[in-house]
C-alpha cells in the first residue's frame, strides 16, 4: 500500500514537472518554444551534473571533517556524480531547473561540535554552489582575457552557454536548497538554528514533505521567490567579467 502511494505521488510529481517545464514552453511558444526549451535543457545538463556533484560532495566532506566517517564509508566524499544523483531531484532540475541531490547521511553523535557541526554540514552544499559559480565566472573572464574573439565563434558560443549554465544552475541550487522544506537543506538548518526537532512543526513538515514540495512547485513558489535574487546574484557575478 505504501509503495502504491509512493508511486502515485511520484507520478503526480513528474506530471507537475512536465506541465511546468516542457508543457508551459509548448503552450507559450508552440513547437519553436518546445525546441528552445529542449536545447536550453541540453546545454544545462553538464551544469546540473557539476552542481549536484559538488553540492553533495561538500556536505560529505564537511561531515567527515567534523568527525563523522559515515559519508566516507558510504562513498560520498567524491565528486563522482553517480554517488550523488537523486532520480527525482535530477528530473526536477532537468524540467524546472530547480532540484536536489541524494541526501548525505551522517551520524550527529559522531560530530565534534554538535549543533554547530550540523549547521555547517547543512550550509556546506549551498556555500559550495556559490564557490563553483564564482570559479566558472572567473573561467569565463580568463578565456575572454586570453582571446576576446573566442566566444564569437560557433564553438566558443557553445562553450560560453555551458559555462553560463553552470553559473545559473549553481546559484539556483544554492537558493532553492535554502527553502525550509525536506529534502532541501534549508529545513535542517532552520530546525538546528531554532531547535525545532521533535516539535509539531518538524513532524508535520517531515511527514508531508513530498506533498508540500509538490504544492510549492505547482504554485510556482520557487520561481516567484527566487527569480529576483537569482538574477541579482548572477548579474553580480557577471559584473566581474
Image (cartoon, rainbow, N blue to C red):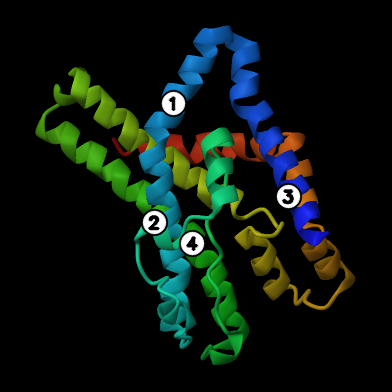
What residue is drawn where x is 59% and y is 42%? 92
Q: Distance between the residues labelled 4 and 1?
A: 25 Å
> Closer to the camera: disc 3 or disc 4?
3
Report the disc number at residue 125: 4
The residue to which callout 2 is attached is: 81
Q: Which of 163 and 148 is in front in this view?
A: 163
Side of 51 where 240 appears, left or right:
left
Q: Which of marks 2 and 3 is nearer the N terminus?
A: 3
Q: Earlier in the sequence, mark 4 or mark 2?
A: 2
The residue to which callout 3 is attached is: 7
Q: How far apart are marks 3 and 4 (CA)?
A: 29 Å
> Closer to the camera: disc 4 or disc 2?
2
Q: Distance between the residues labelled 1 and 3?
A: 29 Å
Q: How far apart are marks 1 and 2 (CA)?
A: 21 Å
Q: How crowded is mark 4: few (under 14 residues within 10 Å), some or many (20 or more)?
A: many
Q: Distance between the residues labelled 4 and 2?
A: 14 Å
Amino acid at each position: 500500500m505504501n509503495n502504491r502511494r509512493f508511486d502515485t505521488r511520484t507520478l503526480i510529481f513528474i506530471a507537475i514537472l512536465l506541465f511546468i517545464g516542457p508543457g508551459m514552453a509548448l503552450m507559450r511558444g508552440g513547437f519553436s518554444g518546445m525546441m528552445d526549451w529542449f536545447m536550453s535543457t541540453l546545454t544545462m545538463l553538464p551544469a546540473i551534473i557539476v552542481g549536484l556533484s559538488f553540492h553533495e560532495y561538500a556536505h560529505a566532506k564537511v561531515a567527515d571533517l567534523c568527525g563523522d566517517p559515515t559519508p566516507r564509508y558510504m562513498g560520498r566524499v567524491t565528486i563522482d556524480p553517480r554517488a550523488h544523483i537523486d532520480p527525482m531531484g535530477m528530473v526536477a532540475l532537468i524540467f524546472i531547473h530547480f532540484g536536489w541531490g541524494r541526501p548525505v547521511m551522517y551520524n550527529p553523535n559522531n560530530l565534534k561540535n554538535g549543533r554547530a557541526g550540523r549547521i555547517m554540514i547543512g550550509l556546506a552544499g549551498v556555500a559550495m554552489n556559490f564557490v563553483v559559480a564564482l570559479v566558472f565566472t572567473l573561467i569565463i573572464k580568463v578565456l575572454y582575457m586570453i582571446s576576446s574573439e573566442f566566444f564569437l565563434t560557433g564553438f566558443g558560443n557553445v562553450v560560453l552557454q555551458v559555462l553560463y549554465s553552470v553559473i545559473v544552475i549553481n546559484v539556483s541550487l544554492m537558493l532553492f536548497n535554502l527553502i525550509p522544506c525536506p529534502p532541501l537543506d534549508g529545513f535542517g538548518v532552520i530546525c538546528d538554528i531554532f531547535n525545532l526537532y521533535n516539535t509539531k512543526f518538524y513532524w508535520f513538515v517531515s511527514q508531508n514533505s513530498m506533498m508540500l514540495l509538490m504544492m510549492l512547485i505547482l504554485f510556482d513558489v520557487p520561481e516567484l521567490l527566487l527569480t529576483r535574487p537569482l538574477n541579482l546574484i548572477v548579474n553580480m557575478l557577471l559584473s566581474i567579467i
